[in-house]
Image: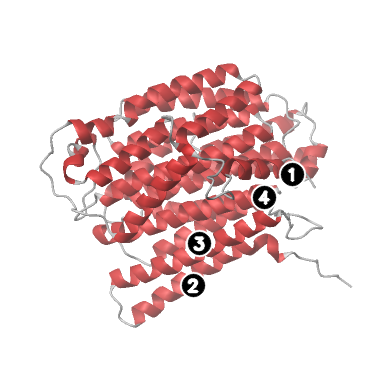
Amino acid sequence: MIQAPDLEFAAVLPLLALAVGAFGVLVAELWLTARGTGPNRAGTALVGLSAAVLLFAGILAAQGFATGAAPSFNPAHPLIRLDRFANFATALVAGATLLACLLSNGYLQEKRLHHGEYYALLLLSAAGMALLVASVDLVSAFLGIELLSIPLYVLAGFDRGALRSNESSLKYFVLGSFASAILLYGMALVYGATGATHYGAIAAALDPTNRLAQIGVGLVIVGFTFKVAAVPFHQWAPDVYEGAPTSVTAFMATAVKIAAFVGLARIATEAFANVEGLRALFGALSAATMVIGSFMAVIQESVKRMLAYSSISHAGFLLVALAAGGDEAHAALLFYLAVYSVALLGVFAAIVSLAHRGQEAERFEDFDGLASIRPGLAAALALFLISLAGIPGTAGFFGKLLVILAAVRAEQLPLAILMALSSVVSLFYYLRLPVAMYMRPLRVRDHRERSDFLELGVLAACAVLVLWLGLAPNGLPALPGLHAVEWTRASAASLTQLP
């Protein structure tokens, strides 16, 4: 007689909430359409439903983090383990997706792209991210990567009437398919060398001198570095970031990077920890990524392409943490992902707020004199940019400081120096926008006079978080429970505690 497995559904609650919410959004759209509700009103209702689902998933992850439990969906054959590391990452993904979702309402109305499947695709992609960050098995990790990627291929081309959007979707799909094939082949080689797919079993059985295992590990790393847009697998990012709708770009640049880096950190730590030269590989990738990302960002004239290359440079900063290794570096990785996502979402919120009658502010000259007509928006955008540059007093400075300190203590001094130099270079391309806004005369252009309510909420939330995480990352006297750095340290500690 076959005995039913003893399943722990607590391990998949955030994932289930996001997946069920996605299908709920599709059903709600059909119901609203049948009632004759206009696209804008229906879109606003779907934004509210999607935001509620994301908030619920974030609360579930926060509760799991607070309890400290680490349930596995099937303890006999664990594919998913929802420990503090996974819960923290899931909460970050839910938060980034929530802000991107709120940004989408007014933007899609301006672009006349309000379709209900947009929010369902966002939720499905977020569900894939929740699966990836909690995966402790190659099978579930691959399923998570594919679930997060396939909706993004569609979202990148969501502006179906724009040739550039269609081109970005096709490029992302073709290159993403190649990367998935490489990743899957690498996983097959690792399985052939170890006879296992679970991370813990792989770590116990993997022979670092086995050539088959080395090739398999290398191909798996290649698959992940495509998702994080690290050099030399970064070519897709500038075209896709520029061609995709801006709200989609904001989602891709933040939530996807969170999930991919957390998944890479978990597999490198729990499955490939015994592989010789892995940290050296991360170090080489980080150096190349920082240099090329920073250099290419300097010469861009499109704001979205500049942000794409700067995102590549930030991927290099995050790879420094993986090259350093250890709990301190992993905590710095999580903190950096949080502060980077908040600041970049704020930048994209400002860009979305300028979209008007189907046109967007895409080039640096489109921001000339913005401070004279939208002083609040210009001030918020300047704050987010100096945070990304790492100016003291902002969240970005503290995030970079934690990564540099972890690299120095891990005797990765050359990477720490290169990271500091790359941050200095970033001042040039990030400060081009404040210079245009405050030091150049206003250009005659058609513009929106004010942001809508949801855009203002996103801008305000990002500004508060940038200042809080920069000035008081260990909490305020009035709010003693908000210890962001301690949260990341507790999360990193659970990563290395193999079952």
Q: Please report the residue visible at 58 percent of the width from the left and 48 percent of the height from the top.
A: 480
Residue 375 image point, x, y percent: 22, 44
Closer to the eye: label 3 or 1: 3
Residue under pointer 4: 84
Amino acid type indicated by mark 2: Gly
Marks 1 and 2, the one that precedes in the sequence = 2
- Label 2 residue SS: helix
- Spatial distance from mark 4 to mark 3, Cα to Cα? 18 Å
Residues 374 and 159: in front is 374
Can you tell which quarter of the image residue 310 is in?
top left
Marks 1 and 4, the one that precedes in the sequence = 4
Residue under pointer 2: 24
- Spatial distance from mark 3 to mark 1, Cα to Cα? 29 Å
Closer to the eye: label 2 or 4: 4
Residues 140 and 426: in front is 426
Closer to the eye: label 1 or 4: 4
102 left or right, relative to 186: left
Residue under pointer 1: 199
Residue under pointer 3: 54
Marks 4 and 3, the one that precedes in the sequence = 3
Q: Please report the residue visible at 17 percent of the width from the left and 38 percent of the height from the top.
A: 369
Establish if 324 lies above or below 330.
Answer: above
Establish if 410 lies above or below 443.
Answer: above
- Spatial distance from mark 1 to mark 4, Cα to Cα? 17 Å
